[in-house]
Amino acid sequence: MLALLRPVPSSTPTLPPANGPQRQLFGIAIDALTMTQAVQRVLAWVDQPSATCQMVVTPNLDHVVQLQSHAGLQQAYRQAGLVLADGWPVVSAARWLNQPLPERVPGSDLVPAILATAHERTLQHGDSERRLRVYLLGAGPGVADRAAARIEQQWPGVQVVGTYSPPLGFEKSSEENQKILQQIAVAQPQILVVGLGAPKQELWVAAHQTQIAANVALCVGATIDFLAGEKRRAPRWLQAIGLEWLHRMLSEPRRLVKRYWHDAWAFPPLLWREFRRRSTASHVDPTSAG
């Protein structure tokens, strides 16, 4: 219990913004994009790849709390090409702090939206050679294979070119990491869907970003499990009122209750500190409030 009540560090990391509309919150530069705009940004990277794989991260409440003291995660966020608010607490806090975000863009919705849009583009062009190439990295043994089958059944305009479920502790093995990178290079995906859980997925992509042979890497947690039907999303009405977290906690209590309890204690001081910081800044310089 004492560990859950430990004070949040007073220093807030400042992560530099990328190009485009953003909101500076809790030391994070969050892209103020709708789901449609985020899909367009990702597919633009698919069409016009940059020299290095673009990383997409989707911070929820737990990410925000971890970022205050996790130097490795801070660095990963610095390297991200797109930072999209996943959790309702983050979106709600942004509105309260007069830094509104247009909507919540969870990774578990972003990936299907990308796949659906890519599928429609393939149909419009009538060219199977233009199918979006996707690689699924993460989830338990066999889960990514089931997700791949369901993806290609639902969106024939998408091709899953590879899947892999790495063993426990793989990130500490240079041999295993090189094996994964080689498999991705051989498969030549345009999008790498990474479902290793946070912060492992963000740390892994950041550490190997220059070696990942894909246009975009999406760090999206349990999305592969959702695509495979292994885990069920909350009903839409629960999502709409911001209670998807409750559904997930009740679905996986042993894994999530402690984490959510910790975050519930840690976030209010963060929110209050952010409010005080902005209030102080607005008194010093009225133009800085927005």
Image (cartoon, rainbow, N blue to C red):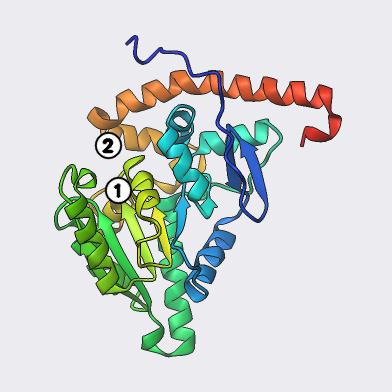
- Residue occupied by mark 1: 232
**CB under 8 Å between callouts 1 and 2?**
yes
With respect to residue 192, does 60 lie above or below?
A: above
Q: Where in the figure is residue 19, as x and y percent of width and height?
A: 64, 55
Q: Which quarter of the picture shows residue 268?
A: top right
Residue 198 vs residue 284: left or right? left
Q: Earlier in the sequence, mark 1 or mark 2?
A: 1
- Residue occupied by mark 2: 251
Label 1: how many Cα within 10 Å (few below 14, some 14–19, many 20+)? few
The residue shown at (46%, 28%) is 65
Quadrant location of the N terminus in the rendered image:
top left
Q: Where in the figure is residue 151, as x and y percent of width and height?
A: 30, 68
Q: Amino acid at mark 2?
A: Ser
Quadrant location of the C terminus in the rendered image:
top right
The answer to which of 168 and 267 lies nearer the viewer is 168
The answer to which of 240 and 51 lies nearer the viewer is 51
